[in-house]
Amino acid sequence: MNKDIQEILISTADINKRVEEMGTEITKAYPPGADIVLVCILRGAIIFMADLARQIKHNVAFDFMDVCSYGSGTESSGVVRILKDLEEDITDRHVLIVEDIIDTGTTLKHVIDILATRQPAGIKIVTLLDKPERRIEKRIKVDYNGFSIPDRFVVGYGLDYDQRYRNLPYIAVLKPDVYT
Ligand code: IMP
Ligand code: MG
């Protein structure tokens, strides 16, 4: 185990099992031949999207959006900025937004509002993790959630602290001295 890790919250095996289940559920939710665009919210969702996409038995397009609401700390600023927009035209297509974690919900609400103006056939949300206690933005409906977790800052499987720990194959909590 990485020396900076205090505790593993979700093991690699549990993540893999849940991602497979979610892929099966998502596969069933769309009709055969559905035109699906997976929208990865950079950078945290890339590992989840790579694994999830392989469990979805439809043709899907990949696209990426980069929004920032966080500095290098662990608290949301509430300020959201688009750093990279989609390349795909999503008009009349089924958008599935892929998130790593929904915390306050500020980032996601902003992304949904922007994408909704482009007349997609539908917008659904899939997230690996949800911190329901932290939600400020109540108008978000999460269609698929991997795990609900308590209000703790987590890293791994795509999630970072100051751009580190994204490549850990599990979800973990860091030792307090890492932040100081
Ligand atoms: P929100 O706008 O507060 O919902 O923030 C969502 C974004 O903040 C996520 O997509 C993550 O990039 C980041 N974030 C929130 N909580 C955590 C965490 O526990 N670890 C790492 N990143 C987090
Ligand atoms: Mg993110």
Image (cartoon, rainbow, N blue to C red):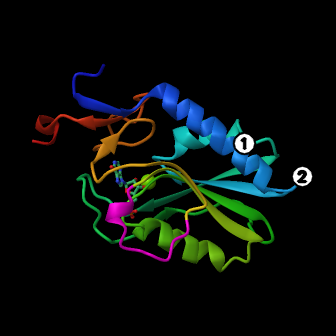
Is the distance from the Cβ of mark 1 to the nearest ligand 1 atom less than 8 Å?
no
Q: Is residue 132 left or right of residue 62?
A: left
Circle 1 sits on which residue? 24
Q: Is residue 24 left or right of residue 42?
A: right
Ligand 2 lies in quarter: bottom left
Q: Assess whether residue 28 is covered by the magenta stretch.
A: no
User: Where residue 70 appears, x then y in whole percent?
Assistant: 32, 59
Q: For residue 32, which numbered disc appears in the image?
A: 2
Number of numbered discs: 2
- Of badges 2 and 1, the one in the foreground is 1
Going by the numbered disc 2, the residue's amino acid type is Pro
In the rendered image, the quadrant that contains the C terminus is top left
Which residue is at the front of the view, 122 or 85?
A: 122
Do the numbered discs 2 and 1 sit on residues whose CB atoms are within 8 Å? no
Q: Residue at x 55, y 41 (%)?
A: 48
The correct choice, above or below, for 74 with respect to 91 in the image is: above
> Which stretch appears magenta?
131-141
Going by the numbered disc 1, the residue's amino acid type is Thr
